[in-house]
Image (tube, helix red, strand yellow):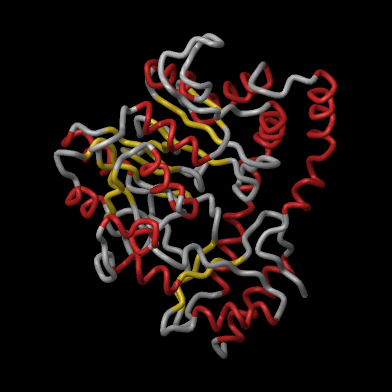
């Protein structure tokens, strides 16, 4: 049996009749950049997330970069974040001229440790950026309190966590509602994915949102009049139309991922040498990834075994950011963030996409059990 890590063709077949007519209309009208289709999607996202402002842009990477610029983050500033995440998190910090400052993660959830992040704050810190990794929110009340104590901006990197929730004071909150801004990616592999690159930054106040809208179109509200140097980071209408068609399905897809994760949790329980994902009692993950910890140096052997049996898997991420060659100038060395480094040696993600069949799920679980002699 073949079980890919992700199969987007199945999702497309389920929504093709909804997506294609609108794409053809946009092509016939030749209105590709921003415009009413993008406006509509932004309003839909505001309603879905319960936020005041949603500003579409060209990618999830740009969503972070635009937010940092909106916070006037630049030369001589520092941004505290996780070394265990996709490169774009720290790359955007570097590209606005600021300095990435890393703090270690919590071993259970893989999310940034609030205590470690606070210890990394200095008088030069302008932004703290927790990452909601693999679909589970970081401890946002702790980060909100941290930002308040130190007078810094709080930026959520929710590239992998659209619609994830956390219970705060008995009330469920979602990504984008406790940070000063929040960045989303609509890369095709995300729970809500476009047909190419696309992203969005949401903001809680009018001034930040207005700044984001200027920055995404070369720094001006009026064509050929530029108040500052911005970027070419506009969300195009074709991608907005795809996302708008997919949005009503998002909850169902995320629910299916949770059901698949629950199956794995039960089927893989008790196997020595692995740890299934840890989800906090007051958290609801959307499982952009279902990520195991595989101890005793056996992660790569398990991945090879699964591949031989036709099962896809992935390592997110093999090298922590503080040990990447391009960040050598920061002066970090091996051993400074042991939990992040250990995660890079142990993580392995299994297929969890919504369209998996019961037979495929059982085959994946049976394959893992077979590797461990269960």
99 sits to left or right of 245: left
Q: Is residue 85 above or below residue 214?
A: below
The C terminus - image quarter: bottom right
Q: Which picture quadrant has residue 227?
A: top left
- Image coordinates of residue 278 in percent, x first then y, are 42, 62
Q: Residue at x 23, y 34 (%)?
A: 152
Please state which of residues 293 and 66 is positioned toward the viewer in this rendering. 66
Q: Residue at x 70, y 80 (%)?
A: 309
The N terminus - image quarter: bottom right
Please state which of residues 281 and 278 is positioned toward the viewer in this rendering. 278
Farthest-out residue, bottom: 373
121 sits to left or right of 101: left
112 sits to left or right of 32: left
Q: Is residue 186 above or below residue 313?
A: above
Q: Which picture quadrant has residue 275?
A: bottom left
Please state which of residues 83 and 142 is positioned toward the viewer in this rendering. 83
Q: Residue at x 31, y 27 (%)?
A: 72
- Image coordinates of residue 70 in percent, x first then y, are 37, 26
Q: Residue at x 47, y 63 (%)?
A: 317
All told, the count of numbered labels is 0
- Image coordinates of residue 349 in percent, x first then y, are 55, 66
- Image coordinates of residue 119 in percent, x first then y, are 17, 51
């Amino acid at each position: 049996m073949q079980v890919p890590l992700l199969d987007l063709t199945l999702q497309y077949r389920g929504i093709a009749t909804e997506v294609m007519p609108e794409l053809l209309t946009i092509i016939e009208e030749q209105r590709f950049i921003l415009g009413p289709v993008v406006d509509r999607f932004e309003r839909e996202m505001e309603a879905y997330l319960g936020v005041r402002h949603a500003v579409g842009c060209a990618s999830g990477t740009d969503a972070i970069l635009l937010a940092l610029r909106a916070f006037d983050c630049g030369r001589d500033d520092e941004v505290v974040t996780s070394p265990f995440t996709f490169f774009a998190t720290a790359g955007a910090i570097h590209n606005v001229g600021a300095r990435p400052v890393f703090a270690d993660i919590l071993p259970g959830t893989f999310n940034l440790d609030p205590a470690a992040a606070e210890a990394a704050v200095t008088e030069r810190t302008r932004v703290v950026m927790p990452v909601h990794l693999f679909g589970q929110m970081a401890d946002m009340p702790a980060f909100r309190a941290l930002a308040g104590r130190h007078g810094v901006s709080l930026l959520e990197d929710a590239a992998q966590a659209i619609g994830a929730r956390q219970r705060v004071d008995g009330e469920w909150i979602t990504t984008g509602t406790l940070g000063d801004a929040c960045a989303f990616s609509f890369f095709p592999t995300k729970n809500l994915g476009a047909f190419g690159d696309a992203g969005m930054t949401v903001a809680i106040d009018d001034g930040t949102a207005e700044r984001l809208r200027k920055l995404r179109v070369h720094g001006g509200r009026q064509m050929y009049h530029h108040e500052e140097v911005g970027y070419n980071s506009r969300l195009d209408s074709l991608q907005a139309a795809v996302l708008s068609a997919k949005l009503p399905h998002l909850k169902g897809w995320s629910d299916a991922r949770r059901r698949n994760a629950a199956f794995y949790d039960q089927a893989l329980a008790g196997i020595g040498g692995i740890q299934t994902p840890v989800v906090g009692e007051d958290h609801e993950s959307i499982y952009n990834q279902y990520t195991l910890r595989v101890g005793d140096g056996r992660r790569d052997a398990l991945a090879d075994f699964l591949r031989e049996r036709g099962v896809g898997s992935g390592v997110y991420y093999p090298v922590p950011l503080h040990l990447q060659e391009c960040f050598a100038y920061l002066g970090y060395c091996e051993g400074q963030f042991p939990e992040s480094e250990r995660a890079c040696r142990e993580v392995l993600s299994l297929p969890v996409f919504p369209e998996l069949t019961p037979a495929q799920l059982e085959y994946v679980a049976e394959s893992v059990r077979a590797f461990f002699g269960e």
